[in-house]
């Protein structure tokens, strides 16, 4: 047999062995990787798994809203009997709509003539009562010496003591009356109780102003509030905000390029029946006074937190039930769980039903049944290019 024939036979033998090896490998691969063939031959079902981990992440929630004053106070003539029911004449108007005012700043002045006269009368009355008390105290001292010397009857001395006591009481009454009169006079100058922005002013000088009639309203705009519509399904994040880091930034329609810092100041107790959202109020830093009430905006709530996450591909939803396959040893077990929303691309939060370190099936769960034996070593059955 010549050399060429031997070479051809050797090549043929190598090709035959390679074909046998390839057929065996493909058959073994099909047995291991095909769930139907694996089940038919009683082999473990091929699956891939992922381990439940505690992940740290930022959850971002957005909500739209409208800005509003953090406080509003109507400016009225003080209610009370002191001013009577006839009304007072407006003599001065110091503000216009849109003007910024500070606490204690005078806004309006009412005709003070009647109350200036009352103050003068009460001052004169107080002076008279003071002089009368001084005179009676001098007399009382002299009568006390006479009583001790025995030249004044006890009953007479007692009468002088009572008169001095009454004089002291009358002076206190006069002092209180003067204080009240001065308070009433001061209230003819209406001042701002807060820093803020003046609303519409529709009264004019010379107009008669009656009690309870509003002259204007002062709106506090620093901080400026914004009421936003927060998704109620994430309300537990707000309730647990003290246990995690939360930041709030607001972007107003009038300042789309600027982010304003804010903080949550109120969380509504119930969901709004019309909008189906939870009303949440945030306070915006408006120290420059440039942001105004009535402007639309968008609030971004950022929560830095940690939670158990599983891949979305592991979730099975059937008849309103949410389930996953877990691997216990080498056995697949179906388990019902409760999930939160998607917090990262491809991951959902586990609320209950799974624990840290457990394994869930992320490939092959479509053909699994509870109690199946599984092979999760995908390197053993997956085809790889050599």
Image: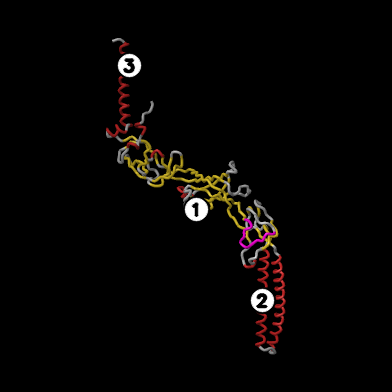
As displayed, is residue 9 above or below residue 231? above
Q: Earlier in the sequence, mark 3 or mark 2?
A: 3
Residue at (66% x, 60% y) in the render = 190
- Locate residue 85: give its quadrant: bottom right
Q: How many marks?
A: 3
Direction left: furthest residue: 41
Residue 170 tag number: 2
As displayed, is residue 123 above or below residue 371? below
Task: State the CA–CA distance, disc 3 to disc 2.
Answer: 135 Å
Question: Which structural element holds mark 1?
Answer: loop
Start-end of magenta stretch: 206-216
Question: Which structural element holds mark 3?
Answer: helix
Residue indicated by mark 3:
11
The mark lying in front, picked from 3 and 2, is: 2
Task: State the CA–CA distance, disc 1 to disc 3.
Answer: 83 Å
Expressed as whole percent of the image width and height from the top left, the position of residue 289 reads: 63, 49
Residue indicated by mark 1:
268
Question: Which structural element holds mark 2?
Answer: helix
Disc 2 packing (10 Å; few <14; some 14–19; many ≥20):
some
Relative placement, left or right, of 142 versus 300 is right
As displayed, is residue 181 above or below residue 217? below
Relative placement, left or right, of 46 versus 260 is left
């Amino acid at each position: 047999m010549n050399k060429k024939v031997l070479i051809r036979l050797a090549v043929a033998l190598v090709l035959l062995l390679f074909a046998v090896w390839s057929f065996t490998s493909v058959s073994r691969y099909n047995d291991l990787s095909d769930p139907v063939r694996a089940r038919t031959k009683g082999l473990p079902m091929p699956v891939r798994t992922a381990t439940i981990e505690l992940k740290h992440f930022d959850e971002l929630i957005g909500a739209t809203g409208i800005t509003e004053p953090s406080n509003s106070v109507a400016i009225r003539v003080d209610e009370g009997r002191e001013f009577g029911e006839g009304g007072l004449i407006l003599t001065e108007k110091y503000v216009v709509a849109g003007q910024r005012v500070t606490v204690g700043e005078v806004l309006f002045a009412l005709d003070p003539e009647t109350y200036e006269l009352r103050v003068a009368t009460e001052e004169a009355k107080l002076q008279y009562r003071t002089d009368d008390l001084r005179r009676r105290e001098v007399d009382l001292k002299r009568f006390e010496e006479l009583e001790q010397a025995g030249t004044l009857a006890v009953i007479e001395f007692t009468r002088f003591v009572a008169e001095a006591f009454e004089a002291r009481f009358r002076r206190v009454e006069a002092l209180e009356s003067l204080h009240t009169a001065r308070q009433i006079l001061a209230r003819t100058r209406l001042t701002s109780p807060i820093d803020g922005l003046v609303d519409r002013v529709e009264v004019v000088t010379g107009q008669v102003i009656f009690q309870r009639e509003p002259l204007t309203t002062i709106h506090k705009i620093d901080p400026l509030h914004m009421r936003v519509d927060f998704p109620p399904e994430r309300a537990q994040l707000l309730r647990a905000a003290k246990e995690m880091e939360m930041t709030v930034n607001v972007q107003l329609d009038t300042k789309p390029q600027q982010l304003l810092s804010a903080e949550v100041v109120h969380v509504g107790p119930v969901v709004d029946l019309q909008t189906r959202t939870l009303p949440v109020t945030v306070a915006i830093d408006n120290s420059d006074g440039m942001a105004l009430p009535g402007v639309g905006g968008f609030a971004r709530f950022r929560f830095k937190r940690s939670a158990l996450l599983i891949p979305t591909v592991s979730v099975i939803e059937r008849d309103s039930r949410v389930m996953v396959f877990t691997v216990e040893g080498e056995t697949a077990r179906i388990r019902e769980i409760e999930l939160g929303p998607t917090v990262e691309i491809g991951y959902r939060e586990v609320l209950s039903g799974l624990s840290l370190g457990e394994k869930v099936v992320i490939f092959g769960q479509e053909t699994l049944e509870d109690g199946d034996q599984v092979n999760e070593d995908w390197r053993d059955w997956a085809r790889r290019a050599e």
